[in-house]
Image: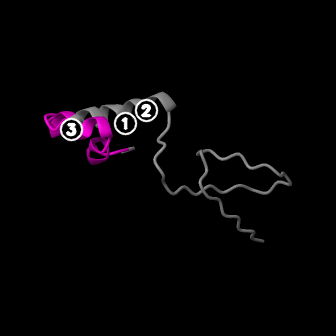
Amino acid sequence: MLTTSAAVRQIPSLRSSTSVPDAWLDAIVSAADSAVKAYLKQNVEMRWYEEFHSGNYTQDVICKQYPVFEANTFITA
């Protein structure tokens, strides 16, 4: 999930609206999460991915998953 119902309830304009049922807010958050991922056509939640690329004497590395938060390089013989 990209956010939680508890995080949404911290939005200043929603803090005073305690009449919003938890089940309804959970459904809205879930639907928005699915809609964002479908629009972007990828899961943008932070995850661990491993990709192996041969050096092939190139300077650029094209990753299948993006955006890249952190990258490590290991050189093996």
Left-right relation of 55 to 20: right
As measured in the structure, the alpha-carbon distance from the residue carrying label 1 to the one carrying label 3 is 24 Å
The residue at 74%/50% (across/down) is 61
- Reading the image, the residue beneath label 3 is 16
Front of the two marks 1 and 3: 3
Q: Residue extending furthest right?
A: 57
Residue 15 falls inside the magenta stretch: yes
- Front residue of 66/27: it is 27
Residue 23 falls inside the magenta stretch: yes
User: The residue tagged with tag 2: helix, strand or loop?
Assistant: helix
Mark sitting earlier along the chain (1/3)? 3
**Marks 2 and 1 in Cβ contact (< 8 Å):** yes
Q: Residues within 10 Å of mark 1 (few under 14, many from 20)?
A: some
Q: Amino acid at mark 1?
A: Asp
Specify the quadrant that holds the C terminus.
bottom right
Front of the two marks 3 and 2: 3
Q: Residue 14 lies in what quarter of the image?
A: top left
- Reading the image, the residue beneath label 1 is 33
- Reading the image, the residue beneath label 2 is 36
Q: Amino acid at mark 2?
A: Val
User: The residue tagged with tag 1: helix, strand or loop?
Assistant: helix
User: The residue tagged with tag 3: helix, strand or loop?
Assistant: loop
- With respect to residue 45, does 16 lie above or below? above
The residue at 22%/36% (across/down) is 25
Mark sitting earlier along the chain (3/2)? 3
Left-right relation of 59 to 18: right
